[in-house]
Amino acid sequence: SAFYFTSSNSGYLLSLFSKIDNFPVWASKFEYIGSALGNIAYFLFVQSLMSTKVRYPKLNKILNILVLLNAIICVLFYIFFEAAFALLLLVTIIGFVFILVLGIRCIKDKIPSADYFLVGYLINMMGVICIILVLTGVLPKNEFTFEFSVPLGLLGEVMLFAFALANMINVLRKDNEEKQKKNIKQLLENQELQTKENRELEQKVAERTNELNRSLNQL
């Protein structure tokens, strides 16, 4: 959806598909459907990155509901455009607030990479808010505020998400190394305990054998 928005504003899509008669109608619907699909991809990414299914089961159910609503919106655009558009705005606003609250919760709980995630999300939202302010007349319309705000916001978000994933990989690797060290330590302790028990058993067998030999000699 972000690619579509940027390429549409630059006129690239119009020049590419200008020979298709139904392109304006198709393009107007895809712009909104692309937004709903983008929301779905974003919510699924958040579930994976923050492991909400394990850490926050209740919040994860809300994300599932938001994903389902966006899927319904995609179909609804072909049936009742006005209702689908209004529902898309409502779900997008709810999703924005929810992701913001979830990011703050993850930082509070010291979830790895939560700070990268939240800052990246806010940078992206700044680009979206800039577009909204331009469309409402609050900000002047120019190349930076209208054409570059969303791409720059996405670029900043992608970079920080890359840092978040890299940090998550490092955390998982350290956890695995610590688990391996603990397993090795446990194996060594078990081996030492087994060796000790074997020696004690051998000693008891030897003592019992000596006792039997003495008894036989006395006989």
Image: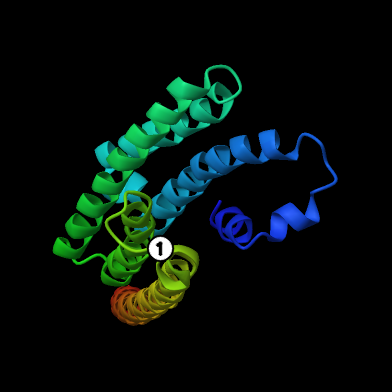
In the displayed orientation, state which residue is furthest to the right: 19
In the image shown, does 47 or 151 lie closer to the viewer? 151
Q: Is residue 110 visible?
A: yes
Q: Quadrant of the C terminus?
A: bottom left
Q: Is residue 158 visible?
A: no
Give the image location of residue 169, x and y in percent.
44, 74
Tell me the amino acid under the disc marked 1: Lys
Which residue is depicted at the point 66% across and 59% down? 11
Mark 1, other Cα within 10 Å: few <14 / some 14–19 / many ≥20: some
Residue 22 position by quadrant: top right
Q: How many marks?
A: 1
In the image shown, does 150 or 176 lie closer to the viewer? 150
Give the image location of residue 135, x and y in percent.
38, 51
Seen in the picture, residue 65 relative to 113 is either above or below; the reply is above
Instruction: Read off the residue under disc 1.
Output: 141
Give the image location of residue 31, x and y in percent.
57, 43
In-image side of 71 versus 193 (left or right)? right
Residue 180 position by quadrant: bottom left
